[in-house]
Amino acid sequence: MNVEHATVFVTGANRGIGQALIAELQQRGVRRIYAASRQPQALAGMTSELVVPITLDITNRQQVQAAVARASDTTMLINNAGALAFGSLLDSPLELIVRDMDTNYYGTLHMVRAFAPVIAQNGGGAIVNLLTMASLASAPAIGGYSASKAAAYSLTQAIRANLRGKGIAVHGVYPGAVDTEMIAAMQMPKTSPAQVAQAILEGVANGVEDIYPDGMAQQLVQLWRQDPNQLAAQLAAL
Ligand SMILES: NC(=O)c1ccc[n+]([C@@H]2O[C@H](COP(=O)([O-])OP(=O)(O)OC[C@H]3O[C@@H](n4cnc5c(N)ncnc54)[C@H](OP(=O)(O)O)[C@@H]3O)[C@@H](O)[C@H]2O)c1
């Protein structure tokens, strides 16, 4: 897809990878950017002629409908918003496991169902889903998150086939560890969100369906391709 001509809608735009995507999109000179956040006040510094703030909790279906009505010229949707609860599936609070599934799977699904018809009407474009290497094999220390992102991976594969004839490319992004608030508690080498944002947009521009945006992701996907159980063993050690 020609990113420079796109009108792009980004969820979870107020921090982390979402914020870095807004900065990178501004540099590339796209047509318009809808920057969506549950906390619109956090977008105040980003707002410009190019960047339109949108209030959006992706688990709120009324807000999703209002967002698509407001952003009806969108040609690229980046489903970046995500939640992560630490803990085992066996004993972490059920509300947190439900929250991860509501956000990462159902929230992404609400967005896709609302925006796919609009992107098709606008002549086609792209949907980009932020997944993780833990979509491909579970990391038991974040068991609920892994399950929700595995569901989002399955969704990505399904809609890729559903939308192929409608001119909408569907991209999955599988970062390794990225230096954001989400995994601030984890001590390990991390890639900067700016580097990940750049790699995502390069991948979309080059038509790469599955984007591994950093060194850790590229190394882990090799392992997964050789033997999925080896990736599971590696993630179990986290
Ligand atoms: N960081 C990593 O190592 C890593 C690795 C692989 C994949 N990812 C994925 O990359 C994406 C971005 O993560 P990040 O690292 O930038 O995380 P982050 O810094 O924690 O940011 C998460 C963003 O999602 C928003 N969000 C959460 N729940 C939402 C909801 N219900 N509705 C709307 N927005 C919501 C947050 O908004 P609030 O500020 O309102 O909470 C925030 O803007 C996520 O999908 C994550 O799973 C991250």
Image (tube, rainbow, N blue to C red):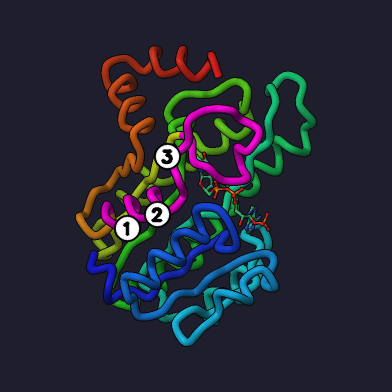
What SS does tag 2 mark?
A: helix
User: Can you identify the residue that label 3 sits on?
Assistant: 175
In primary-sequence order, the first of circles 2 and 3 is 3
Looking at this view, name the residue that lies furthest to the bottom.
Answer: 49
User: Can you identify the residue that label 1 sits on?
Assistant: 201
In primary-sequence order, the first of circles 1 and 3 is 3
The amino acid type of the residue labelled 1 equals Leu
Q: Residue at x 33, y 22 (%)?
A: 224
Q: Which residues are magenta?
A: 177-203
Asked whether 192 falls inside the magenta stretch, the response is yes
Q: Quadrant of residue 62?
A: bottom right
The amino acid type of the residue labelled 2 equals Ala
Quadrant, the C terminus: top right
Q: Gap in Å between the C-alphas at discs 1 and 2?
A: 6 Å
Q: Residue at x 32, y 50 (%)?
A: 199
Q: Is residue 184 above or below residue 69?
A: above
Q: Gap in Å between the C-alphas at discs 2 and 3?
A: 10 Å
Q: Residue at x 45, y 15 (%)?
A: 234
Query: Is there any visible trace of residue 213 in the rendered image?
Result: yes
Along the line of sight, the residue nearer the viewer: 212 or 194: 194
The amino acid type of the residue labelled 3 equals Pro
User: Can you identify the residue that label 2 sits on?
Assistant: 197
Q: Tell me residue 214's x, y (percent).
A: 35, 39
